[in-house]
Image (cartoon, rainbow, N blue to C red):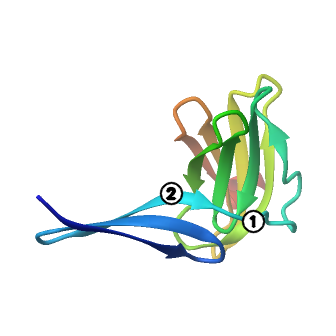
Amino acid sequence: AVVSTQSGHYGRGGCVDVEITMSIAIANLRHVFGLKGDVANNVAFQDEQTIIYPSGSNCILYNMETKMQKFISSVDKSSGMTAMALTPNKRYIAVAEKGEKATITIYDLQTLRKKKKVPTATLR
């Protein structure tokens, strides 16, 4: 049973809904504001209505018609996104992240699920 629901701010420009149950508080990202300008290829179009861009530690899919956002969160222990690239068929996006172990992660844009994670040691 939900005891209460609260809204608040997240990171550097986002909003979350926090649902507090009897024993667990769950935070769901609702909206993110801003653009991470230091990411290579930081704006892409998935289709005529959907723009993809990095903001904070997320990759945002923003539908300009419905004004709704979908989110792809960064990998654990990431120090930030450095680049992103959309495949020519616009089905997948590759996101490069720096950190103790830099990685490139490929996501399916239809399901928003991780398809493959490539550690940079493999890329050498």
- Image disc number at residue 30: 2
Q: Residue at x 67, y 44 (%)?
A: 61
* Amino acid type indicated by mark 2: Arg
Where in the figure is residue 122, as x and y percent of width and height?
69, 53
Q: Is residue 93 left or right of residue 10?
A: right
Quarter of the view holding residue 119? bottom right
For disc 1, the marked residue is: 34
Q: Residues within 10 Å of mark 1 (few under 14, many from 20)?
A: few
For the C terminus, the quadrant is bottom right
The answer for how far apart the CA atoms under marks 1 and 2 are is: 14 Å
Q: Position of residue 70 (x, y in %)?
A: 57, 45
Along the viewing direction, whichever of 20 and 75 lies nearer the viewer? 20
Q: Quadrant of the N terminus?
A: bottom left
Instruction: Indicate whether 114 appears above or below 31.
Output: above
Seen at 48% across and 60% down, the residue is 29
What is the number of the mark on residue 53? none
Q: Which residue is located at x 52 percent, y 32 percent?
A: 111
Q: Residue 73, percent across and down?
A: 56, 57
Instruction: Give yes or no for contact between labels 1 and 2 (Cβ–Cβ under 8 Å).
Output: no
